[in-house]
Image (cartoon, coloured by chain):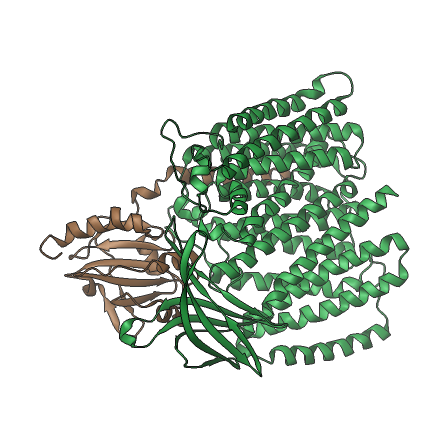
Amino acid sequence: MQAKRYIWPLAMLLGLICMLGNSFQIDRRGNEATQVGKPFPVFSQLDLENKPKQKQALMGKLTLWHVWASWCHTCEIEWSQGFEKIPGVQWVGMAYQDTKPHIQMWLKARGDPFAFTLMDAKGNLAFQLGVIGVPETLLIDQNAKVIAKWDGPLSPQRWQQQVLPMVKAHLGENVI
Amino acid sequence: MIELGHFACIIALCLAIAQAIAPKWQGDVLALQQSLLTRECLCLLLACVSLWWGFLNHDFSIAVVYAHSHHHLSWWYRLTALWGGHEGSVLLWITMLSGWRWAFTHYGDFDDQDKSAMMTVLAMIAVGLTAFLLFSSNPFLRILPNAPLEGNDLNPLLQDPGMASHPPILYFGYVAFALPYACACVMLWRGRVIEGWAGKLRPWILWAWSVLSVGIVLGSWWAYRELGWGGWWFWDPVENASLLPWFGGALLIHGLALAQKQQAAQTWTLLVAIIAFILSLLGTFLVRSGVLISVHSFAADPHRGVWILGLIGVYGAGALGLYSTRVSALFASRPVAMLSRAGGLMLNQGVLAVMLATVLLGTLYPIILEMFGLGKVSVGAPYFNQVMPLLCMPLLLGLLVLPGLDWQGKHWCMSWESFINLGILLVSMLVLTWLLIGWKPNHGLACLTLFIALMGMVVSIWHGCVQHHQLRKQHVVKSWAMTLAHVGFLGMIASIALTSVLSQSSMTALRKNKPYTLAGHTFVYQGSERIEGNNYHGVRAKIIVKNNGHSWVQFPERRIYLPSQMNLAHTAIIVRPSYDIYLALGEPLTEKDNQEGWTVRIQVKPWVRGIWCFALLMAVGGTLAAWSRRQGHAS
């Protein structure tokens, strides 16, 4: 009887190990449980200039949806490499769990590559999008369907080898 | 050469196995273990030297040298590149473990028999980790037959004195947590308490914790200068991983005091001893192997991850399994008076444990949510910045009343006079807080924290002075050591409160010869020039900073490191007695602005240096305490 009181640390450790072991099995690169292949969730939010934005803003254009935060220093490194503008493709920013002044300061400093920027202060939209962490980038097609998702910063190599070919394929050759 | 290192490492593994099974032999087990250990240390040193040799001679056929070095890299960063990657870090870890073990067998206070048993446990740890090194993170492998001619370069972020010295110092602290773990295992295994175990362990854990503190300070200082953001703590999983063992160490130091002086809470302290080591394993390996760096890279190398989990499972579950079955018979429970120093330490243990749990939960929260299919999130600074200051408050208040408490709790050592003194203190600190910070309704908690921390500092120093006159000579150093550590902690909290409230920051476009003013300082950009470094090129801007007749010329830079093409800001910082002026170069203004200039992040950060200075003071206090305890035993 006495011993049972002291078993909880062991139980907690085993729980922790199971948990960590379990996350090995989830293949995060495999985009399962994310929105890839599914329509973009419906949203209605104010952007930085307090203009309402809905899902319609994504229709008819190829969109690169960038999720980041000013408190994330991986983002800092990613942003130092800049964002390439491609004709016919709009960049949309979503600031994850952040405040407006921080984001405005950030965009003023580094330039604003975005058509518009949404504040996702509570992380609700990110939750629906299956965002694991910041930074993340989603590619959304003209019918507002998510076609690809890249976790982590887009290094120049990743941009050249993974993102750009996919963007070009969906733009069609007549545009570029 | 590298094959020699590889071979030495295999021998080291065999030597560690021999030490682990040495108790099976008859005769002087400890002497045998010591002589085996000395050889193991030498073997591991040889292994390190062989890798260094490869780094110094640009032997890019070695996989780790290829991954972390480059012809342009200067020789000191080639040496520190050893721990720039996971494999080298594990080697460093094991080498340091052997060093600590060596020091422990030769300078530990335990009896020969106890020491030999602890050596056995420590050798088992060494066996597991050396096997992990050789079978899953081997740094001695070559890329053959097509050896590359050029390396990938050390991550430019790591090419900085702060970051170069940060990992070894951090590990030096981490590794020592194996000692209390071994002691706990031995006592549990035998079902018998080692007489005076808490007192004998304390100097070791004081050393470890102090060194760990220095390591964390170095990391924070590096982040401040190198990341160009002006922040000094990001609550990033990597940072949290180093903070967890630090909390473990702080818990252990105070818990051991409780166990030593009062024979109270020993069951709890034993548990902390085990958990602290598990946390330091978690800290080192989860971070370096890329498992915790961010949730993204979690499954970067599943094979390695399984090894790490296996090691944590074996050492953790082994010790905790023993704990669950045997600890109840080990100690008699002993109640303590709540209004006594022992009661205060109980409060300290509770609060520190909650803080530890908070950080742990915040770090693992994304994984927990994911496990139950509740979605994927990452927990950032906002969570910690809200919770941690509140949790700090009881610690501050505890330090405030500490001098009024004695061990037995027979009486409050407070007289009417001291109440009058307290009144004077209260008023004068209120005035000081007002002078430093004013009243900022938005930052009520920070103002209150500052006020209490300042009071705590005065009370601690006053208490130190009183003790200085009252105590016998051999206790005076110990008392001052505690005072220094506590003042360091309080000062750190006060600095954090001050910096977070008073910092002024601005992102602005500086045009040529157009002055800009922030917080009474005038900034003038005067032009920029190209720079060429050893392995980078870039631009530096000349910015004149003026304030009340003082004037400084500063050169913040943007660097592009050649091999990796990584673009980094190199900050310029003016250090004033009470504040820092921080300049980080952003992007050049575009041509359509029609004038030369840069976007610059300018920050004026009062008392930011206080955070590190006081944290170092805390480490000095810890070191002094460890040293005085050794002196005490020697005499």
- Does the image show residue A23? yes
Q: Residue furthest bottom?
A: B548
Between residues B311 and B523, which one lies in front from this camera angle?
B523
Which chain is assigned brown?
A
Q: What residue appears at the point 15 percent right and 57 percent down from the top-left corner?
A: A142
Left or right for B343, reference A29: right
Q: What residue appears at the point 30 percent right and 58 percent down from the top-left corner?
A: A66
Left or right for A115, reference B148: left
Q: Quadrant of residue B436?
A: bottom right
The spot of residue B307 in percent (x, y) is 49, 32
The answer to whether B250 is drawn above or below residue B104 in the figure is: below
Q: What residue appears at the point 82 percent right and 55 percent down from the top-left corner?
A: B477
- Does the image show residue A99? no
Q: What residue appears at the point 64 percent right and 32 percent down from the top-left corner?
A: B322
State the count of labels: 0
The answer to whether B621 is drawn above or below residue B318 in the figure is: below
The answer to whether B290 is drawn above or below residue A174 in the figure is: above
Left or right for B131, reference A147: right
Between residues B202 and B573, which one lies in front from this camera angle?
B573
Between residues A29 and B231, which one lies in front from this camera angle?
B231
The spot of residue B570 in percent (x, y) is 47, 61
- Colour assigned to chain B in the rendering is green
The spot of residue B346 in percent (x, y) is 71, 53
The spot of residue A40 in percent (x, y) is 23, 56
Which quadrant is home to the C terminus of chain B? top right
Q: Residue furthest left?
A: A174
Q: Residue furthest top?
A: B26
Left or right for B623, reference B520: right
